Amino acid sequence: MTGRPERLFPLFGPLSTLAGIGPKSEKTLAASGTEKPRDILFTLPYAGIDRRLRNSVRDVVPPATATVEVTVGQHVAPPSRSRPYRVAVKDAETEFNLVFFHARGDWLRQQLPTGQKRIVSGKVEMFDGIIQMVHPEHMVPPGEADEIPAFEPIYPLHAGITQKAMWKASRSALELAPELPEWIDAELMKRQGWPRWREALFAAHSPEEQADLGPTAHARQRLAYDEFMAHQLTLALARSSLKRGKGRSTEGTGQLRDKVLAALPYSPTGAQSRAIAEIAADMAAAHRMNRLLQGDVGAGKTLVAFMALLTAVEAGGQGVMMAPTEILARQHLEGLQPLAADAGVRLELLTGRDKGAERATKLAALASGEIEVLVGTHAVFQPDVQFHDLRLAIVDEQHRFGVAQRMELGAKGSRADVLVMTATPIPRSLSLAQYGDMDISVLDEKPPGRKPVTTALVSAGRMEEVVARLQKAVADGHQAYWVCPLVDESETSELTAAEARFKHLRARFAEGEVALVHGQMPPAQKDAAMADFVAARAKVLVATTVIEVGVNVPNASIMVIEGAESFGLAQLHQLRGRVGRGAAQSTCLLMYQALSDSGRRRLEILRDTEDGFRIAEEDLAMRGAGDLIGTAQSGLPRFRIADMESQSALMALAQSDARKLLSDDPTLEGQRGAAARTLLWLMEQDKAIRLLSVG
């Protein structure tokens, strides 16, 4: 199937083919992402107005909308244009006024002739003890009563587009909607009581009561499922095209891994052992691994990752671990070095800073296979970086790639396995949306010996108390982080805040005891300040959020976060994870200026739990999916109808359905498969269709 099916053409035509949409409205709608009839179909009403015919305006409690049949009485024209025009009317029980501002009397006398009957619908209000209806939305002769919908849908609007225009456009788009073959499994349709696609659209655009507007209404649920299904099919196709990509079986002897485990002062957690086994099984299979290792702060991802790298080395190959920044790459190197020493393997670091002869030596050792495990930044992607036999690429995905970048990455090593690591616990619904193409291993237990961190809320007014406590702690041999507030989006003001706090603290401590790290510093200076802190020459590290990821200083047992209310939950949780890594009892102080209700709730959640997954779920509930990840770089789909938060069970259902459909019919040629292709075209998942043709 090479192009979009013909029956869908009308839905992808210009908006101006719809009633109520002229050139100007077409421009306005296009600016908001509504460019074709299909987009109007997927813009559902969010509210409704009850316009059922009532006996009298007395049947509602003002202010409220009412629709009644009236007999038109006399017109009272105002003495000046600044006063309203009134028309007296009488329904079955009472008299009231219709009120118009800046009205044209001749037009109103034509619309509302005295002595005639009219059906009027609008908002009923009390004014000086008199009932009135200002500017009724509908005024029609009784014979045209069915022009007024009993329950009028209210659409989300953009400047310059009226409800009437949206109503007309949506009716006209519905007329274009064809009958389509069914892509949902028949059993599932029956079990859920879902209507067919076209029927669902008509029902969603013509709600009969409030309940029809909610996400649990059958018609809306079905349409949400269609969006999830198209998205999950795309991910499942990406996954199967990766699996079809010739992998190679990498099976280790276990010798090196046993050495490391024997040298550990503790046993791995159940979650670590499970993840290690899942990864080893994937690597041993003939197809390429595409797995996500998701672990909370301090859940021990380093050990799991290194075990995977050792499997590659045991099989005679090499492994690479990539981090987004140099600071993080060096952290990984430090974390892996003791383990590499236990195993007796050669581990090296490659970053953009390696130049000249030093770089050439490393590249030669890499190409000959002497370097068994490489840690690096994206510099390892450069064309002159050649591996002898790359078996495994691990990406520490601090700023997540989308599916497309993951596919490019896999192309670097000839058939190398790919393991993506993330330190951000992701709620299930989001991980399904974002990583639905991957298999997932979750580390949800803390290794033994990590003490809980005591978290407290402190008002900024108690700053001096906090500094005094800090002086005492430093005198007792402890170290501390002091994170400066996110002032606003601009880096400069964040910098000013950090520099001001640095000067303030420097005056209270001995020479050289306070160090400063921020994003604007030259890398060498930043590394020097970090090195002073790691070596405990500096006791207090004042920083902007550059330290939120990866930094590991076991002796640091205090974390002060200034302006904590301006940070997101996930970020606060990551920052807190920098302490509590050593033997000492650790403390995290959340210092706030002024707290809104939601700000207080955020900080209290953090105070009450250290479970990153629970924090992520709460964060999602409070902020919504786009904010949680920063939609611009999230690789997250934008759904028009479906809601990832409230409908995550539906998303999970779509994932298993999509995977099953593809395992039964990998090329989507069967009856339901062909219908699913139509769905992919309808949902503009052209990438997925290309994957089908590649396959």
Image (spheres, rainbow, N blue to C red):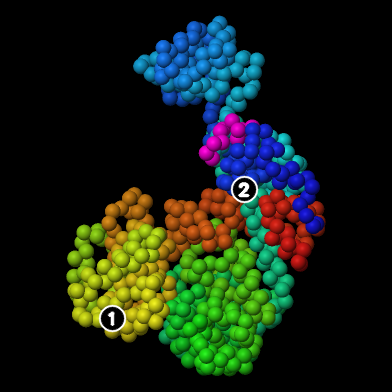
Q: Please name the residue shown 50% across and 82% down the image.
A: 351
Residue 315 in picture, x, y percent from top left: 63, 88
Q: Would you call the spot at circle 2 few (<14 residues within 10 Å), some (14-19), or many (20 or more)?
A: many
Q: Earlier in the sequence, mark 2 or mark 1?
A: 2
Gap between marks 2 and 1, in whole Å? 55 Å
Closer to us: mark 2 or mark 1? 1
Q: Which residue appears at 48% of the width and 65% of the height?
A: 425
Residue 569 is inside the magenta segment: no
**Residue located at (29% from left, 70% from top):** 499
Report whether residue 258 is seen.
no
Taking 269 as reference, is 514 left or right? Answer: left
At mark 1, the secondary structure is: loop
Observer able to see residue 5: yes
Residue 217: where, in percent of width, then height?
Answer: 59, 40
Q: Position of residue 15 (x, y in %)?
A: 67, 41
Which segment is the magenta one? 158-168
The quadrant the C terminus occupies is bottom right
Q: Which mark is residue 538?
A: 1
- State the image coordinates of residue 262 (x, y, percent, origin top left): 48, 89
Corner quadrant of residue 197 = top right
* Residue type of the residue flagged with mark 1: Ala
- The amino acid type found where label 2 is placed reads Ala
Q: 492 or 277: which is nearer to us?
A: 492
The residue shown at (60%, 24%) is 148
Which residue was labeled with disc 2?
224
